[in-house]
Image (tube, rainbow, N blue to C red):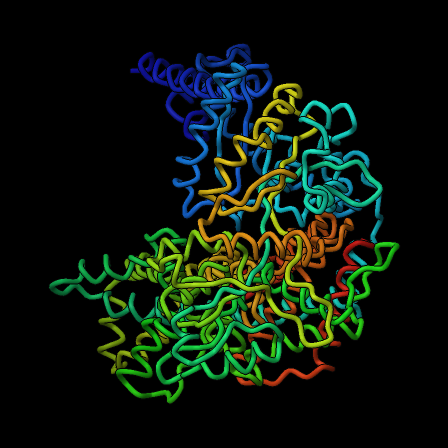
Amino acid sequence: MSVVTKSPDRKVRRRGGAPERRRRKPGWWLPYALLGPAVLFEILVHLIPIVIGVWMSFIKLTKFFIANWGAAPFAGLANFRISLDFSGVLGKSLLNSFLITCAFTVLAVGLSWVLGMAAAVALQKAFKGRAIFRTLFLVPYALPVYTGVIAWKFMLQKDNGAINHLLVDNLHVLGDKPFWLLGDNTFVSIVIVAAWRLWPFAFLMLMAGLQSIPEDLYEAAAIDGAKPFRQWTNVTLPMLRSVNTVVLLVMFLWTFNDFNVPYVLFGTSEPAGGDLISFHIYNTSFLTWNFGLGSAMSVLLVVFLLIVTGAYLILTNRRARRA
Amino acid sequence: MKTSKTLVGIAAAVALTLTTAACGNGGSDNASSNGDSKTLTYWASNQGTSIQNDKDVLKPELKKFEKKTGIKVNLEVIGWNDLQTRIQTAITSGQAPDVVNIGNTWAASLQATGAFLPFDSANMKAIGGKDKFVETALKTGGAPGKTYTSVPLYGLAYGLYYNKKMFADAGLKPPTSWQELVTDAKKLTNPKKDVHGLALAAGSYTENAHFAFINAAQDGGGWFDSKGQPTFTKAGNISGIKRYLDLMQTDKVAPTSNAQYDNGTKSVNDFANGKAAMVINQNNADNSIRSQGMKPNEYGVVPFPAPTGGQPVASHVAGINLSVFKNTDNKAGALKFVKFMTSKDVQKTLDKPYSALPVLKDGKVTFTSKAKEAKTFQKIYNTMSKPLPLVANEDQFESTVGKAMNKMFAQIATGKSITKSDIKQALSTAQQQVAASSAG
């Protein structure tokens, strides 16, 4: 849009003086016309559902009212009170799910970042076959979520899954075939699957970031006697600061909200270790048909994510300014 | 250059607007196609061996209906795992089909939404009168004292399937009491050969909720009081659940991997493939068993036995009901369709491929040629089954108690032990969940 309004005939306008400035350029409406549908659909697809979602959190939208929303009584803050009452069963399980999700997010994002960084650095210098590796590394990201995760679901089966076959039958690392999709191991499973999905994104972004670091810096560092690790900490990391800020934030938001992975892996019953928060909220509202309560939980989740995002941005900006 | 840019822009804008308009048109076309008196949309649950199989079975019947009434029926077959969510979404959005299949245990919960057409005396008359239905089947149509919002379509009941050869080889007779069931199952279990006495769908919360109900009923338990308030922690409920969990925990007649079986088909397949000597399933298991290559004369069916001295409850009154959405634009056509689907001829035709029990009073069992099996299932359905709680919160019973059972099976499978006090704790949590989420 800015391109169209600022560019070619600024000179003409200046020469023409005041009356002509008021007269609109032919085609001034074009950018608006082009943007119009997008804005309209943005409102339709995002804004309205958000407003409705917030409204739902304040009403008693149980199965008695879903056919006629208008009749649902106003609930005030009752839905929020139940969600945040950590001595009650629903609040307690929400808190528990929240804590699991925090641990899950830290591990999955951390693991993805480490893997993405390692791969990006490894492929930084040109060598024969680099393109093959680059393509290969992006496969998990290119696969549809459902396909990738369902393959993991098969691999993680207890009796005939590939993971247990490898660990128990081939490598004899474990004595008994463990459950990967039941009980506490589910946490390990979901962290691994989520990191597998996510790391190519970190890889892609960091690889792009690495392209912009001038080669001279590494040469200078090498002349000063810096070994590869020192080069990485003193050249690569500082130069990637802004990329990292964004990559980590985006990965945090995606992972914290992740619904697809637990839903495809575990279906409708959330195991103790894989009880991630979006999935938990879905189960709370869909299986008990209490959409008001589910919305209140979602609103709380959004508020939490907004606070974290805001704090993170302020913090990273301040640091950047200081540096 | 400039003109061409403008032209492109106009073209793009027009194209965009047109597509939007087209979408809008498409939408309203669809809506109106529901609206006229010549079409109906029908959501059928998946009853056959696959969704395609269902289409193949239903299409000829729908053609007959079209020929008879001139009403075209648009069919959509929906898998069991999606059906409840789809119905929920349809109720919430108002974008609903005209006629829909529901699991009959949801009838009272769905009735409470107010989204379905009540079968009052006029509507009941339009579909052929309530007297044509088997009474136990009709009673699942909604909460007692309220006008039914669904009518029975296919009848189902649980039975204990056993492998005749395995029983004969071990010199056993099919069990008539719980104690015999466990003794037999132990004899037939051989973990080294990967053969077990029983296969359980221990990871399916709906199956688990059914067995919580049936086993508790055998012990005189109950889940809701007369006011519809949950009474989950009753002694009979705890002992019934304990007995069922113990099949895996202490009797060890079902393998721990069953805790991952999230639908009934997996346990039935184990039975059909000789990995389990017995399986407790509804009569539509006949379909899956045969499709896995087991012949009808290779298995027998007896009622799921109660412990000695317990109540002889062998099943809940299971099955599929038909409901009409209240906001249908073709009420007369919808009622005609319900009448057609619950007519003698169609019932006779559909009961066979769907292995369903007749819901009509003078109906004959057609799904099996084995007279004994037919008799057993009809006896269970008519005299040994109890309806699941006919209260608005029934769905919450299924999800909270069923999921608590899933969790306990998972704990057993991963080596923890579950005591009666653990069960009581879990049921008390489930009850609080029901109370808290209805209060919100």
Q: Can residue A303 be seen at all in this image of the molecule?
A: no
Quarter of the view holding residue B409: bottom right
How many numbered discs, if any? 0
Residue, x 35% and y 81% (percent of image)? Answer: B193
Q: Please tell me which residue lies in front, A69 or A195.
A: A69
Q: Is residue B100 left or right of residue A147?
A: right
Q: Look at the image and tell me in which quarter the N terminus of chain B lies.
A: top left
Query: Which image quadrant is residue B118 in?
Result: top right
On the image, the x and y values in percent for residue B30 come to 52, 21
The residue that appears at 56% across and 35% down in the rendered structure is: A45
Residue B4 at least partly seen: yes
In terms of depth relative to the viewer, which is nearer, B372 or A301?
B372
Give the residue displayed 63% in from the left and 57% down from the top.
B380
- Residue at the outermost right position: B227
Residue closest to the eye, B93 or B124: B124
Up the image or down, B403 lies above or below A17; here it is below
Q: Position of residue B316 (x, y in %)?
A: 66, 57
In the depicted structure, whether residue A20 falls above or below residue B262: above
**Which residue extends farthest front?**
B371
Name the image quarter holding residue A97: bottom right
Instruction: Give the x, y percent position of residue B333.
Output: 61, 20
| Up-down relation of residue B239 to residue B91 (above or below) | below
- Residue at 44% across, 81% down: B189
Residue B257 lies, in percent from the top left, at 46, 74
